[in-house]
Image: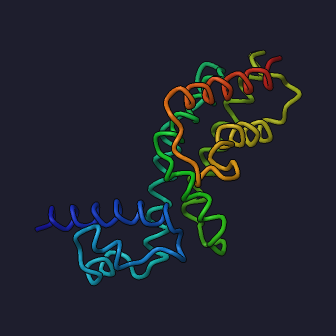
Amino acid sequence: MARDGADTQTRILDAARTEFAAYGLAGARIDRIARSASASKERMYAYYPDKKALFLAVLDLNLREFASAVVLVNNDLPAFAGALFDHTISHPQHLRMIDWARLETDGTLTASLDVVVGFRDDQVRRIRAAQDAGAVDPAWDPMMLMTVIFGIISAWVHEPGSEARRAPREPEIADRRANVVRAVGRLCRP
């Protein structure tokens, strides 16, 4: 029975991930999540006391996956940016959840924020080490450079009208990735 409970909770999180990424906290419907998870609303409330708690659980899960997926290695910021871009293409719900959290929460993201801050601080230390090794322009403040890199890798997600158009094809994705890598390479070249 414990296994069924874990399976049910996993199905709820998976369904909630899809629902919240599409509609945000305010627009998501508990009945749609329950139906998609093949679970009752009562079972959902046994795991999560309210919709916001479920949203925060999904956000935390997404942020942990994001933070563990890509790290800067070998002082190679262009490769890091390319890997971040690849992750955002493979897991678009991660960026969408970050956007919804920025729009719809009231600063009660403490646990999730700790994950993001830990990831950011680790990458900032790695950028500083790359600067010390002569691989990155030392004129950059490492925190600012991390922010700029994140902006570059997420630019197409936030491009006006991107939701109304068709999904990009493989050649377009490859071209965008190449531009991300090239832009970051030029930005941080010593």
Q: Position of residue 135 (x, y in %)?
A: 74, 17
Q: Where is residue 128 in the image (x, y as percent from the top left)?
A: 75, 29
Query: In the image, is 142 to the left or to the right of 96?
Result: right
| Coloring applied to the structure | rainbow
Quadrant occupied by the N terminus: bottom left
Foreground residue, 127 or 4? 4
Quadrant occupied by the C terminus: top right
Please say if 75 is above or below 109: above
Foreground residue, 122 or 8? 8
Q: Where is residue 24 in the image (x, y as percent from the top left)?
A: 53, 68
Q: Where is residue 28 in the image (x, y as percent from the top left)?
A: 46, 74
Please say if 34 is above or below 156: below
Foreground residue, 185 or 133? 185
Q: In which quarter of the image is residue 143?
A: top right
Q: In which quarter of the image is residue 139?
A: top right
Q: Residue at x 27, y 67 (%)?
A: 37
Q: Which residue lies furthest to the left in this view?
A: 1
Q: Residue at x 60, y 65 (%)?
A: 101
Query: In the image, is 123 to the left or to the right of 138?
Result: left
Please say if 81 is above or below 148: above
Query: In the image, is 35 to the left or to the right of 171?
Result: left
Foreground residue, 8 or 2? 8
Q: Which residue lies furthest to the front in this view?
A: 165
Query: In the image, is 156 to the left or to the right of 128?
Result: left
